Image (tube, rainbow, N blue to C red):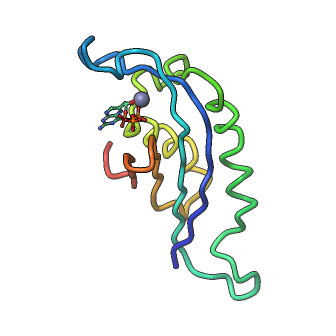
Amino acid sequence: MRISQAFKFEAAHRLPNVPETHRCHRMHGHSYRIELVLSGRVDPRTGFVIDFFELEQVLGPLLRQLDHHCLNDIHGLENPTVENIAIWIWDKIRPRLQQLSAVKVFETAGCWAEYDGDEP
Ligand SMILES: Nc1nc2c(c(=O)[nH]1)N=C([C@H](O)[C@H](O)COP(=O)(O)OP(=O)(O)OP(=O)(O)O)CN2
Ligand SMILES: [Zn+2]
């Protein structure tokens, strides 16, 4: 069984490694959406793979770190592409969420990265 929970945050960023002519080189903002995907067996007593409230507790501190901040100022997010944000979130929460199977980060409705721990 796979379950997902979505979260939102607002943040500013710029991409330091694209050419100066690239519009994302300049500071701008996005309404980001995060989706956490969890895989596991349904507990026969609770009926849950994992309680959504538990996910909120695990992700909450990270959301507070991200929301209404400049992502470039956050340690590990100096180049805040959706790919790097997804890896950053995965690395921070996977040790506490063994059932985590993917982290999706949407920058816009049509652009997102999905990370499942497949890179070193
Ligand atoms: N592979 C990636 N490519 C790009 C990323 C990224 O994280 N990974 N990021 C960007 C920029 O952040 C850029 O701001 C994205 O802009 P855009 O998709 O155009 O979205 P906007 O909302 O800013 O523009 P609209 O035209 O209003 O949709 C670029 N590439
Ligand atoms: Zn951007």
- Residue 87 quadrant: top left
Q: Nearer the viewer, residue 49 or 3?
A: 3
Residue occupying the point 24% across, 14% down: 21
Q: Which residue is drawn at 67% across and 82% down?
A: 43
- Outermost residue toward the bottom? 44
Q: Name the spot of residue 31 as percent of width and height, x first.
A: 55, 38
Tell me: 30 left or right of 50: left
Q: Where's residue 6, x and y in %?
A: 60, 56
Give the left or right position of residue 75, taking residue 26 as reference: right
Image quadrant occupied by the C terminus: top left
Residue 10 x %, y %: 60, 34
Q: Please report the residue visible at 56 percent of the width from the left and 20 percent of the height from the top.
A: 70
Q: Name the quadrant where ligand 1 sits.
A: top left
- Compared with 108, 13 (above or below) is above
Which residue is located at x 56 percent, y 71 percent?
3
* Residue sticking out furthest to the top: 20
